[in-house]
Image (tube, grey):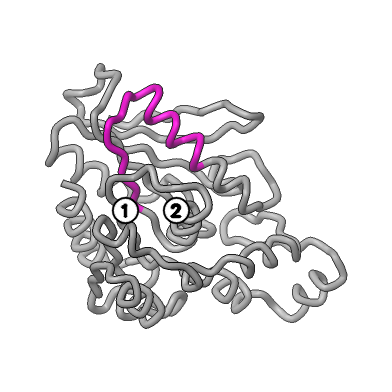
Amino acid sequence: MEKHFDINQQGFSIRCKLFVKDSDKNTRTFSNVVLVTHGFGSSKETAGTVKFAEHLTSKYKGYAVIAFDWPCHGADARKKLSVPECLTYLTIVTQYARDELKAKNLYIYSTSFGGYLTLRYLIEVGNPFRKIALRCPSTDMYRAMSNHITDDDRTKLKKGKEIQVGYERKMKMDQSFLDDLNAFKATDHEYFDFADDMLILHGTEDAMVPIAESKAFAENNVIEFIPIEGANHPFQNPNHMALAIHKIVEFFG
């Protein structure tokens, strides 16, 4: 069962989607809740998220999945991207899972930009998660973003102007956002305290975030790393996505 709902707190309205097994549709509390966060320019409404939630909730009892839109993404109402607001969204959704769903165990499955934010959250806020799965995480989001900014947009940013970024939906970004990304690179921090409960998967044909980046990060922090042969950044091949989902569901179980 899928249900859309909003969390309205601190002046924000976070667009969420709850997934539970059909037989649990009238259940109000869940011992285990998995948060799913998407990549840059994406949203909670992806086929991969649906397949992950279906696989997880059909395999294990007492599990629910919450996917949500980052600020300026999907159905979110905000227009200008901000890292602090992204981290606030994650805090609010985490607290909702604890307070409203009464989750005893929290998990998170994050992709790309979502992976960067999750890694940053662990260092700057803390770790509320029992297990953490990252797919194609951007450990250096500043470099990833900078590589896709045109020369014209760079000139605008240097002049203090905002630019429009994104894919299907455009959002505003200014130099302060890039400066914030540049101020935090996951590679500048140690994750040994979280390593036993982390899993990183990465496609060997990822043209957005090089697999070597994730592999080196995982090795330096003694984190389990699984390369997915032939997969690109969004895991467009259904077989690649199915394999990734299988590995993550087994890890969370």
How busy is the neighbourhood of tag 2: few (under 14 within 10 Å), some, or many (20 plus)?
some
Which kind of residue does numbered mark 2 sit on? Leu
101 w.r.t. 230: above or below:
above
The image's mark for residue 115 is none
Distance, label 2 to label 1, CA atoms, is 10 Å
Q: Secondary structure at mark 1?
A: strand
* CB contact under 8 Å: marks 2 and 1: yes
Task: Check the picture and name the quadrant holding the N terminus.
Answer: top left
Place residue 150 in its image quadrant.
Answer: bottom right
155 w.r.t. 90: above or below:
below
Front position in the image: 66 or 105: 105
Q: Which residue is mark 1?
A: 132
Residue for point 22% across, 34% down: 63
Q: Nearer the viewer, mark 2 or mark 1?
A: 2
Residue for point 69% across, 47% down: 79
Q: Which residue is mark 2?
A: 122
**Number of numbered discs present?**
2
For this view, does 159 lie left or right of residue 26?
right
x and y percentages locating residue 73 in the rendered image: 56, 49
Mark nearer the N terminus (2 vs 1): 2
179 w.r.t. 88: above or below:
below
x and y percentages locating residue 172 in the rendered image: 71, 56
x and y percentages locating residue 66 in the rendered image: 37, 37
For this view, does 159 lie left or right of residue 197?
right
How busy is the neighbourhood of tag 1: few (under 14 within 10 Å), some, or many (20 plus)?
many
Which kind of residue does numbered mark 1 sit on? Ile
Residue for point 69% across, 61% down: 177
x and y percentages locating residue 34 in the rendered image: 31, 41
Residue stretch rendered in magenta on the structure: 90-109
Residue for point 69% across, 66% down: 179
Can residue 15 be found in the magenta stretch?
no
Q: Secondary structure at mark 2?
A: helix
